[in-house]
Amino acid sequence: MSEQTMDAAVVERGPQKAPIDRPAKPVGGEPGRGRKVFDGTLNVFSHAFLVVWGLLTALPLLWVVLSSFKDDAEILGDPWGLPSALRFDNFARAWTHGNIGQYFVNTGIVLAGSLTLTMLLGATAAYALARYKFLGSRLVYFVFVGGMMFPVVLAFVPLFKIVGGVGLRDTLPGLMLIYTAYSLPFTVFFLTAFFRTLPDAVAEAAYIDGCGPFRTFFRVMLPMAKPGLISVGIFNFLGHWNQYLLPVVLITSDEKQVLAQGLANLAISEGYRGDYSRLFAGLTLAMLPVLVVYAVFQRQVQSGLTAGQMK
Amino acid sequence: MRHGKYPLLLAFLLPPLALYGYFVVSPYAQSFLIAMTDWQGLSPAYEFVGFDNFKRMIGDEYVWNALLNNLWLLVLLPLLTIALGLFLATMLNVGGRGGRSTVTGVRGSGLYKVIYFAPQMLSVSIVGVLWAEVYNPRSGLLNSALRALGLDGLAKVWLGDPAYAFWAVLAVMVWANVGFYVVLFGAAMQSVPRDIYEAAALDGASRLTTLVRITVPLLWDTIQVAWVYLAILALDGFALIHVMTRGGPNFSTDVVGLRLYTEAFGDYKWGYASAIGVVMFFVTLSVTVLSLRLTRRERIELS
C-alpha cells in the first residue's frame, strides 16, 4: 500500500505538471477516437455539474448574508438584488430585540460546561474501560455503546419527567448535564478505541518510574491521546452547538433558549410580524461564526468529522 | 501496573456511569414501561393497559402515514445522497484525466470540497430556517429565480402544498448531507492505489465504467457505513421537519418522531407517545441490522 502510494506520488510529481491545470480538455491519447469525443463532452458536463452543485450550496448562504443588509421592501420586492446600503442596524435589532444576543450567551454557557464535562467524563471512562479488565468491564462498555442504538425521541417523555423531578427543567445547568449524558456513548466508543491503540509499554514505563495510576493518566496517557481528543472534541462541539431536540423538550422560557432553538422560534414569530430583515440578520449572526471557524480549520474539521464516522 | 487499580476505576467510571444511567439508560428503560400504560401526563394517575397502545396504533392512520413518509425517506435519502456523493467525489479525486497516465482531481477540487462540506457546519435549525426562506412563495430565492427565467408556472407554494412539501424537505436533507459524503468517499478514494485507476484509464474505461466497476466495489465498506448512517437519519428527520413544516401541510411531511412529539407534548398522551417511540426503536434497530446484512459483501483487501 505504502509502496503504491509512493509510486503514485512519483507519477504525480513526475513528468508533466501542466496537464493537471487544464483537465477540461483531455489529451489522453490511449482511448479510441469516438470515446475521446464522448469523454470530452462528458468532461464538460461533469465539470459543469460540479459548478452547479457548488452554486446550489453557496448561493443560499450568500443570499442570506446579502439579505441581512437589506430592508424589508428590498427583501420582498427584489430577492436577487444587492442591498442598496449596508444596514448594520438589522444586526443590532436582531441582537437585542430578536434576543439573538441572549441566545448566543446561553449557548456559550451551556457549551463551555457540556464540552468540558463530556471530554472529562468521556476520556476517564474510556481510559478505564480500555486499560483495565475487571468484573463486568465488557458489560459497562456495551451499556455505554448501546446508547447509540436508541433514537433520542424515545427518551422524550421520561426525560421530561426525570429532569423536572430534579428541578433541572428549563435551566442551563440541566442542559449541560443532559448534553453530556447523551454524548457519552459516542465519546466513550471513540476514545476507548483510541486508548487501546496507545502502546502499553509507555504506561508500564511510567509505572516503573514511580507514576501512580492517576498521574499516569493525566501526565502521560492523556497527552498521547491528543489527536483522538481533538477529533471527538470537534465532533461534540458541533453536536452541542447544533443541538435542537433536547432543548426543544427541556427549555420552555424564552430567555433560556439556545441559539438553534431560539432562531427557529424567531423565524416563526418574524413570519407573523413581517420583520424579515431582522430574521436574515439573525440567521447570518448564527451562521457566520461556525462558517468562519470552518474556513480557517476546514482540514481539521473535515478529517475530525469523517474519522468520527468511520470508527 | 495493576496495583491500586480500584481507586482509579471508581473515580473514573462512577461519575460518568451515574450521569449516563440517570439521564440516558433510565429514560430509555422507563419509556418501555410507560408504553404499557394509559398515562396522560398531566395527572399522576395511570393504569397498566398491556399492549392496548400498540393495538390502537395499528388502526391509527396518522401513525401509518408518518411511518410511510419515513420509509420513503429511507429509500430515497441514502440512494440520492450516496449517488450524488460518489459522483462528486469521483470528479474531485480521480475525475481529471490530465495527461497520459496521471489520474488526479479536476482543477480547483480543494475549493469545491470546502464549499460542499459547508452545510455540514450549520445546525439543522439554521438549515431549516434558511430553506424555509428560500422556498418562501413570495420573496424566496427559488420562486424569484423561476420568475426571472420566465417560468412562472413552476413557481409553487413549496412548503404549503401537500404535493410538493415532502419533496422540498427531502431536497434539503440531500443538500445538507451530500458534502459530508463527498469528503468521506474522497478520503476512501485516496487510499485506493492510483495504479488501479491508471490501469483502468489505459484500458480505455470511461468514467462511468470506472465508477461502477472499480470505485464502488473498492469503497464498499465506506458505502455501507454511509448507507446505515443515512438510513438512521431518514428514520429520524424530526428536527428539520419540526423547524420547516411541523409535519404539515395536511400531514404530508409528518414523520414518526414528530408524531411522538405531537402526541406527547401536544395532546399529553404520554403512554401512547412512548408506545410510538418503542415501535420507532424496533424499526430503527431492524433497519440497521437488515441493511448491514443485505449490503454485506466480500471485502476487497487493498495491498
Image: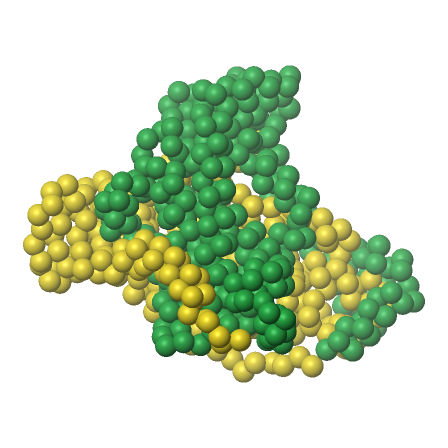
Chain colours: A green, B yellow
| Direction from residue B281 to residue A64 in the image, left or right | right
Q: Is residue A285 visible?
A: yes
Q: Position of residue A144 (x, y in %)?
A: 39, 64
Q: Nearer the viewer, residue A163 or A252?
A: A163
Q: Say left or right for A29 vs A289.
A: right
Residue A280 location, x and y as percent? Answer: 52, 28
How many numbered marks appear?
0
Residue A190 horizontal/vertical position (percent): 51, 64
Q: Can you say whether B261 is above or below A33 in the image? A: above
Residue visible at 32% across and 37% down? A170
Quadrant occupied by the N terminus of chain A: bottom right
Q: Residue furthest front?
A: A210
Note whether B172 is above or below A13 in the view shown: above
The answer to whether A281 appears left or right of B137 in the picture is: right
The foreground one among B180 and A285 is A285
Q: Position of residue B253 (x, y in %)?
A: 35, 46
**Quarter of the rendering containing residue B206:** bottom right
Residue at (45, 65) in percent of width and height: B8
Note whether residue A271 is visible.
no
Q: Nearer the viewer, residue A271 or A180?
A: A180
Which of the 4 quarters of the picture holds residue B15?
bottom left
